[in-house]
Image: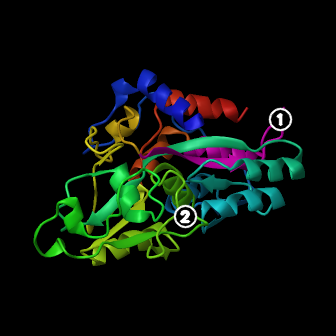
Amino acid sequence: MYKKSILAALLVMVTAVAAHAEKVTVDPKIKKYSPAAGVAGNLGSIGSDSLNNLMTYWAEGFKKKYPNVNIQIEGKGSSTAPPALIAGTAQLGPMSREMKGSEIEEFEKKHGFKPTRIGVALDSLAVFVNKDNPVKSLSLDEVDAIFSKTHKRGAADISTWGQLGVAGKLAAMPISLYGRNSASGTYGYFKEHALNKGDFKNSVKEQPGSASVVEGVAKDIGAIGYSGIGYATSGVRAVPLSAKKGGKVAEANYANVLNGSYPMSRMLYIYVAKKPGQPLPKVVEEFLRYALSREGQEVVVKDGYDPLPAKLVDAQIKALK
């Protein structure tokens, strides 16, 4: 429901700021970051691998402004964020998916209130093929038929590139599958949205991180894999997608995330433990304000993800209060 409301808001509010695919720019209405006084202490982040590089870049910029802040970042998967927030071993819980109901219940059981979710960036979750693979586009029905053994979208199994209309030496070549492990929020998002909550094939080569998925596809002409667009390299190509076979095809770019036409658009989050009616610890609040500032959103672009439009930034900042 939250994802739908975000996409609806994007359609209404930010069509005018949609950037061209070749050049993503930060909304000039987003305010610059103004450093605060008295910010110091330790800050721990445990969670998403998809957000790991972005969190590291933010941490580097934040430490330049606040040398007395010590930041530790660990990115082994979104499923590691809720336990860390529950136990208090981290103050920041980056996730590439929303928390599950069961995770929220466990958090509330421990703290007596629900976690606060802050959107920090947009992503077009990409289906990557090797740069030399000529396949033009895929539908999510075909993606399901490639990756899933349960085929909940109804398409027949696809195991070779020839079945997708690829000719030449690739036609008879088996499709080599790369994906994330079950600790990953990207794994969970892909399973829910691409596979309709179906089961992955046993032949998927599960990788511990997004970078290794992309690296595997770059080295294997017959490979296909999925990852956040921020991990794209020159060795792979993001395949344009349609929701249904024969439907409108959209490239994995900022404009199509904003207008809702790319079927694998998502928000990336940082969860925090904010007691209702009470402010966050100063160091936590300022880190989030930095991430949501113009400077912080320029870091989002640098890392290959898509920045939030100003009105969405304003909505996230309100959640900090």
Q: Secondary structure at mark 2?
A: loop
Magenta includes 244? no
Q: Which mark is residue 49?
A: 2
Q: Residue 102: where, in percent of width, then height?
A: 76, 51
Above or below, comparing residue 188 to residue 176 in the picture? above
Residue at (69%, 59%) from the top-left corner? Answer: 81
Q: Which mark is residue 69?
A: none
Does any portion of residue 25 appear in the rendered image? no
Above or below, comparing residue 275 to residue 84 in the picture? above
Residue at (33%, 37%) from the top-left corner? Answer: 255
Looking at the image, residue 81 sits to the left or right of residue 87; the answer is left
Q: Read off the magenta span.
A: 264-291
Q: Residue 73: where, in percent of width, then height?
A: 63, 65
Q: Residue 177: where, in percent of width, then height?
A: 38, 71
Which residue reaches farthest left?
168
Quadrant, the N terminus: top right
Indicate the amino acid at tag 2: Asp
* Total count of labels: 2
Indicate the amino acid at tag 1: Pro
Residue at (13%, 76%) from the top-left corner? Answer: 169
Q: Residues within 10 Å of mark 1 (few under 14, many from 20)?
A: few
Residue at (18%, 68%) from the top-left corner? Answer: 132
Q: Residue 86: where, in percent of width, then height?
A: 81, 57
Looking at the image, residue 67 sits to the left or right of residue 194; the answer is right
- Name the foreground residue: 291 vs 78: 78
| Rendering quarter of residue 258 | top left
Above or below, comparing residue 120 to residue 64 in the picture? above
- Residue position for label 1: 276
Q: Secondary structure at mark 1?
A: loop
